[in-house]
């Protein structure tokens, strides 16, 4: 993995949806943040910097790099090592990293009052993504093919919930292979010290949410 020291970045993000005007956001990626770069062990596929996400809108615009707080980046480096030992040639496939709260507000506008609302943090309190301590990711094999996890990323369905895997295995809605793939990712991330969000197989926090909110500042 290539993790380099980040630099000051000016990002242009949508301040609304559809044809709403744009807003300039200054993100100063100082010494507390590091950039995670693509390598033969990491594939970067930031879905909210494309239209390939549940909103169908590029929410990040020019803010299209993966940043994490340096403590989360250190843990990610350990997770890569654990994955490499368990599945040589496989790589982490990263969907989302630091997400400014301005983008969280756009996501919230999309889901509030819908069945998807429980899956998106209210921007009033913020997501752990907004602090740079959360990461969304999956796995890719040695041929760079995305691994089957039973649902796509951002599939806001019970089938994506790790806590219900045994239930869906018994009913045949998830296979043992799909759950096994999730466990490979889970093992690497948890051994590195990440905490899994129990309603999304792809979401991991570097520390418990209460710790992050108490000790660190949100990125607007």
Image (cartoon, helix red, strand yellow):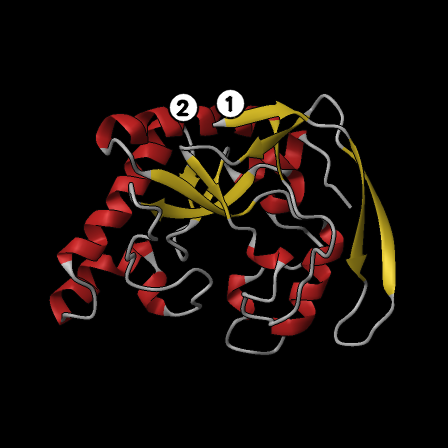
| Residue 192 at least partly seen | no
Query: Residue at the spot x=61%, y=61% of the render?
Result: 50
Which quadrant of the figure has residue 148?
bottom left
Query: Residue at the spot x=61%, y=78% of the render?
Result: 113
Q: Which residue is mark 1?
A: 74
Query: Residue at the spot x=39%, y=63% of the render?
Result: 152
Of 220 and 45, the residue lying toward us:
45
Left or right: 196, with 176 as reference point: right
Of 202 and 142, the residue lying toward us:
142
The local crowd at label 1, few if under 14, some if 14 to 19, many if 20 or more residues have their Cα within 10 Å, is some
Q: Which label is found at residue 78?
A: 2
Compared to residue 64, the image places residue 151 above or below, namely below
Left or right: 2, with 168 as reference point: right
Q: Alpha carbon of mark 2 to alpha carbon of mark 1: how far?
A: 7 Å
Position of residue 24 measured from the top left corner of the image (x, y, whole percent): 87, 52
Compared to residue 125, the image places residue 57 above or below, namely below
Q: Are the two marked residues, 2 and 1, in contact with CB atoms closer than 8 angstroms?
A: yes
Position of residue 155 measured from the top left corner of the image (x, y, whole percent): 42, 67
Compared to residue 157, the image places residue 219 above or below, namely above
| Helix, strand or loop for disc 1 | helix
Of 148 and 122, the residue lying toward us:
148
Left or right: 77, with 150 as reference point: right
């Amino acid at each position: 993995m290539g993790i380099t020291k980040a630099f000051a970045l000016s990002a242009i993000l949508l301040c609304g949806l559809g044809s709403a005007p744009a807003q300039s956001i200054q993100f100063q990626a100082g010494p507390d943040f590091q950039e995670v770069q693509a390598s033969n062990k990491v594939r970067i596929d930031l879905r909210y910097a494309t239209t390939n996400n549940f909103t169908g809108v590029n929410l990040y615009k020019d803010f299209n790099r993966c940043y994490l707080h340096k403590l989360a980046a250190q843990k990610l480096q350990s997770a890569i090592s654990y994955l490499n030992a368990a599945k040589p040639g496989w790589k982490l496939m990263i969907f989302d990293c630091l997400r400014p709260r301005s983008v969280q507000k756009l996501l919230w506008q999309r889901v509030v009052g819908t069945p998807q609302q429980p899956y998106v943090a209210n921007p009033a309190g913020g997501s752990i993504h907004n602090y740079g301590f959360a990461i969304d990711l999956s796995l890719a094999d040695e041929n760079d093919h995305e691994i089957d996890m039973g649902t796509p990323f951002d599939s806001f369905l019970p089938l994506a919930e790790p806590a219900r895997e045994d239930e869906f295995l018994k009913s045949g809605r998830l296979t043992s292979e799909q759950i096994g793939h999730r466990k490979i990712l889970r093992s690497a991330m948890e051994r590195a010290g990440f905490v899994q969000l129990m309603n999304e197989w792809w979401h991991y926090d570097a520390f418990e949410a209460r710790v992050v909110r108490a000790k660190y500042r949100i990125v607007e």
